[in-house]
Image (cartoon, grey):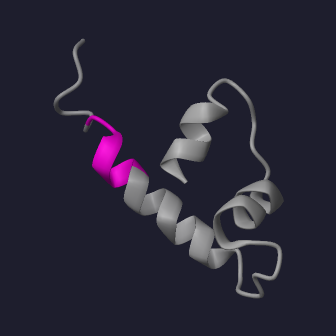
Amino acid sequence: MLALLFRERGNAVSRETILREIWGIDYYGTTRTLDQLVVKLRQKIEVPASRSTS
C-alpha cells in the first residue's frame, strides 16, 4: 500500500482502488482492514508532535 500511495502522491486514491490493487478484485473482506493498515502506516511514518520543529 505504501508503494501505491507513493506512486499516486498528490492524488486522492479511493478505497476501492487500494483494495483492488493490493488484495485483488475478489477481495471480500471489510474496509476496516484497510483502516487498520492506514493507522499502522501512519504510526510508523508520522513525526510525533513533540518532535516536530516549531
Q: Is residue 44 magenta?
A: yes
Residue 26 versus residue 46 in the image, above or below? below
**Foreground of the two, 43 or 27:** 27
Residue 19 versus residue 3 in the image, above or below? below
Residue 15 lies, in percent from the top left, at 76, 58
Residue 19 lies, in percent from the top left, at 72, 66
Q: Count of labels shown?
A: 0
**Residue at point 62%, 28% (across, down):** 9
* Residue 31 occupies quadrant: bottom right
Q: What is the residue that sits farthest to the left in this orientation?
A: 51
Q: Is residue 51 magenta?
A: no
**Foreground of the two, 4 or 32:** 4
**Residue at point 39%, 61% (across, down):** 40
Residue 25 versus residue 46 in the image, above or below? below
Residue 41 versus residue 29 in the image, above or below? above
**Residue at point 77%, 87% (across, down):** 28
Residue 54 lies, in percent from the top left, at 24, 12
**Foreground of the two, 26 or 32:** 26
Q: What is the residue that sits farthest to the top in this orientation?
A: 54
| SS majority, magenta | helix
* Residue 13 occupies quadrant: top right
Instruction: Give the side of residue 19 with respect to residue 54, left or right.
Output: right
Residue 18 lies, in percent from the top left, at 71, 57
Magenta span: 42-47
Task: Specify the quadrant that holds the N terminus.
Answer: bottom right
